[in-house]
Amino acid sequence: MIIFASLKFIYSKGMKEEKYKLPYFICVVRNFAERAGLTTKQAFNYLKRYKGIAFLDECYPAEHTLSIENAVEDLIVVCKRNGGEIS
């Protein structure tokens, strides 16, 4: 539930209003967490710190057309470029 509240806060603070964006973010973050062996909260904090959430927001029009697995792979690359160490 914390992940939802955090994303809802970010969503209400300037993200473009799109009906499916928030559920998509939650799904991707949960899948990232599972792959990385993190809790959802830890995954969200990691993605926020290393620009993964910003990437999902900026690239949503393209990313949501890909599989969730591809989105998670893209997040790993983006976070590594910004100092993250999860692979």
Image (cartoon, grey):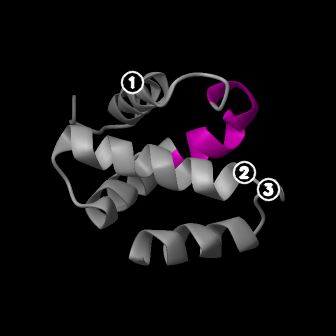
Q: Amino acid at mark 1?
A: Glu
Q: Position of residue 75 (x, y in %)?
A: 43, 33
Q: Is residue 53 visible?
A: yes
Mark 3 residue type: Lys
Q: Which residue is mark 3?
A: 19
Which numbered dot is residue 73? 1
Instruction: Say if the magenta span includes residue 75.
Output: no
Q: Residues within 10 Å of mark 3 (few under 14, many from 20)?
A: few
Asked whether, in this view, residue 78 is left or right of residue 55, the answer is: left
Residue 27: % across, % down: 48, 49
Disc 3 + disc 2, Cβ < 8 Å: yes
Distance of label 2 from label 1 (alpha carbons): 21 Å
Q: Nearer the viewer, residue 53 or 4?
A: 4
Residue type beneath disc 2 = Tyr
The reply, left or right, for residue 59 in relation to residue 39 is right
Query: Which residues lie in the magenta part?
Result: 53-63
Circle 2 is placed at which residue position? 20
Disc 1 is placed on an element classified as helix
Residue at the (31%, 37%) spot, across then down:
83
Q: Could you tell me if the residues under marks 3 and 1 are in contact, i.e. CB atoms within 8 Å?
A: no
Q: Reading the chain from its start, which is encountered first: label 2 or label 1? A: 2
Q: Is residue 4 left or right of residue 18?
A: left
**Can you tell which of label 2 and label 1 is closer to the viewer?**
2
Q: CA distance from mark 3 to mark 2?
A: 4 Å
